[in-house]
Amino acid sequence: MRKPIIVGNWKMNKGPEEAQKFYIELEKLMKNKTLDIEWAIAAPSISMVSLMAGDDKGLYIPLAAQNVHYEKSGAFTGELSLDMLMEYGLEYVIIGHSERRQYFNETDETVNLKIKATLNNSDITPIMAFGETEKEFDDKKTLSVVRKQINNGLKGINPNDAKEVVLAYEPIWAIGTGKTATPKQAQSVIKYSRSIVEEMFGKEVAQEIRIQYGGSMKPENIQELMKQPDIDGGLVGGASLDAKSFFKLLTYKK
Ligand code: PGA
């Protein structure tokens, strides 16, 4: 059984003060609630401290980084290493988000280096994002784009490690646009993605690996998306910024 995983991606939103307000609100909502899913928030690095409990009675929020460098340390201004993320207690790292690919020269090759470094040098779970642009979607290239990104991103990884990776299918035309892929569309691409994992690593890994959907996921559509047999969770931008809405996502009805 694959455990659902919902991750809020705050992108470049919320400084320490706003993050602290969010923490207080979410902590109230979560009182006496136990979740049977995995979850995390990918906050800006500088705001993460505001999401950490002050004592062991406070709400524990699993944290994710939005990016990482594959080198251990050195002259890489503006970057963070895996050791630094681990020292901070981070549990996940998003790798290859389309905004990083689009605006910061992230390529399939750097994605692959980062995934391998994360698996080899840390106990952090990599979340590898992939998905097609609107033009590629219109040109009916979705499946070939997805195939290439998964093949290149997971190249050279051994099957035992591969099942630890979380994949996140995010059609770029659905990110931040309010346009969600229909549950059927998302299911069909995610099922196809699972078949690529099977080709690469075998049936067992394909059955175990978790694949999220991302792109305008919100409380109103999460239930239908999560009903799809191959969708194992969500990578959520906009709807994770409000504590009530994020709480609704975490407690979606199965
Ligand atoms: P969105 O973003 O939910 O605002 O569409 C998703 C993402 O970019 O991960």
Image (cartoon, grey):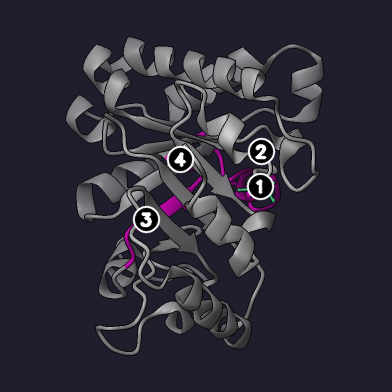
Residue 212 appears in the rendering: yes
- The residue that appears at 54% across and 84% down in the rendered structure is 20
Q: Amino acid at mark 4?
A: Met
Q: Quick one: SS at disc 2?
A: loop
Residue 131 position within the rendered picture, expressed as x and y whole percent measured from the top left: 61, 30
Inspect the image, locate mark 1, and give the three-letter code of the amino acid beneath it.
Lys
N-term-proximal mark, 2 vs 3: 3
Helix, strand or loop under label 1: loop
Q: Are marks 1 and 4 in contact (CB under 8 Å)?
A: no
Query: Does the magenta-highlighted stretch encompass residue 250?
Result: no
Give the residue pinned by disc 2. Answer: 221
Segment colored magenta: 90-111
User: Which image quarter: residue 240?
Assistant: bottom right
Distance between the alpha carbons at the discs numbered 3 and 1: 21 Å
Q: Is residue 214 positioned above or below 118 on the image? A: above
Disc 3 designates what residue?
92
Label 3 sits on a secondary structure element that is strand
Q: Amino acid at mark 2?
A: Asn
Return the disc, 2 or 4, that comes first in the chain's sequence: 4
Point out which mark residue 128 bears.
4
Check residue 218 in the rendering and tell me which mark sits there, or answer none. 1
Q: Classify 10 Å Cα crowding around label 1: few (below 14), some (14-19), many (20 and above).
A: many
